[in-house]
């Protein structure tokens, strides 16, 4: 944790607190998501996290937020992500008028590319919603918050929950 200096709090959700921070050595701005172990047990499946990290190391995907590091901290652990300026729920909330058709198309295209990448790598997100779609300063959309994600088998024969969280 000494390698990072906290700049402020970005968000707080079901699985942890997210901070804006600076990596001291490189000066790079990152987002730190602190996850408590107690919540971990009923929240983030370890296997999915490992899978996501592996997937992100094999192939850098433009439309899935980059997980840069994971390390234990206190009774839980910290996930280090690339920093993103905003999320889609904020973008919608802060704009005076509805998104234009071309904006909607653009966001939808990036969302679908990100979802396709997850599915190609046998990961279902299971909590896609505007607050979990991060927007960069250049307007790029990336899927985040794999707290409810799970790895699925393409072999078939397995049954999955019909509904987990957001429809
Ligand atoms: P939770 O499981 O608590 O919902 P999220 O990963 O969705 O956690 O993060 C909560 C909020 O923090 C997001 O909705 C977003 O606004 C902000 N956030 C998360 N990750 C980042 C990031 N990498 N860069 C900037 N903001 C982020
Ligand atoms: Mg979330």
Image (cartoon, rainbow, N blue to C red):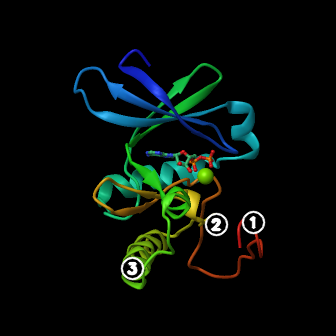
The quadrant holding residue 159 is: bottom right
**Mark 3 to mark 2 CA distance (whole Å):** 19 Å
Residue beneath label 2, please? Answer: 126
Q: Which residue: 71% across, 46% down? A: 43
Q: Which residue: 50% across, 48% down? A: 50
Mark sitting on residue 55: none
The quadrant holding residue 75 is: top right
Comparing labels 1 and 3, the label whose residue is closer to the camera: 3
- The answer to whether mark 2 and mark 1 are in CB contact below 8 A is yes
Q: Which of 160 and 19 is in front in this view?
A: 19
Question: Where residue 63 sits in the image (x, y, percent)?
Answer: 37, 65
Q: Is mark 2 within 8 Å of ligand 2?
A: no
The 10 Å Cα crowd at callout 3, few under 14, some 14 to 19, many 20 or more, is: some
Question: Mark 1 vs mark 3: which is more N-terminal?
Answer: 3
**Mark 1 to mark 3 CA distance (whole Å):** 24 Å
Picture layout, residue 128 above or below residue 155: above
Left or right, 60 with respect to 36, comes to left
Question: Where residue 37 sits in the image (x, y, percent)?
Answer: 68, 31
Q: Which residue: 44% across, 22% down? A: 6
Q: Residue furthest front?
A: 96
- Identify the element where label 3 is drawn: helix
The tally of labels here is 3
Mark sitting on residue 164: 1
- Identify the element where label 2 is drawn: loop
Question: Where residue 162 sits in the image (x, y, percent)?
Answer: 77, 76
The 10 Å Cα crowd at callout 2, few under 14, some 14 to 19, many 20 or more, is: some
Residue beneath label 3, please? Answer: 109
Q: In which quarter of the image is the N terminus?
A: top left
């Amino acid at each position: 944790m000494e390698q990072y200096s906290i700049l402020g709090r970005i968000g707080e959700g079901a699985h942890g607190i997210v901070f804006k921070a600076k990596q001291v050595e490189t000066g790079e701005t990152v987002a730190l998501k602190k996850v408590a172990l107690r919540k971990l047990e009923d929240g983030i499946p370890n296997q999915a996290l490992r899978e996501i990290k592996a997937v992100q190391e094999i192939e850098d995907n433009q439309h899935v937020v980059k997980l840069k590091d994971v390390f234990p901290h206190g009774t839980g652990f910290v996930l280090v992500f690339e920093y993103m300026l905003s999320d889609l729920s904020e973008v919608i909330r802060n704009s005076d008028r509805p998104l234009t058709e071309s904006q909607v198309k653009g966001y939808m295209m990036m969302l679908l590319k990100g979802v396709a990448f997850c599915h190609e790598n046998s990961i279902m997100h299971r909590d896609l919603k505007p607050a979990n779609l991060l927007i960069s300063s250049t307007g790029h959309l990336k899927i985040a918050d794999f707290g409810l994600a799970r790895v699925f088998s393409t072999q078939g024969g397995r049954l999955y929950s019909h509904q987990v969280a957001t429809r």
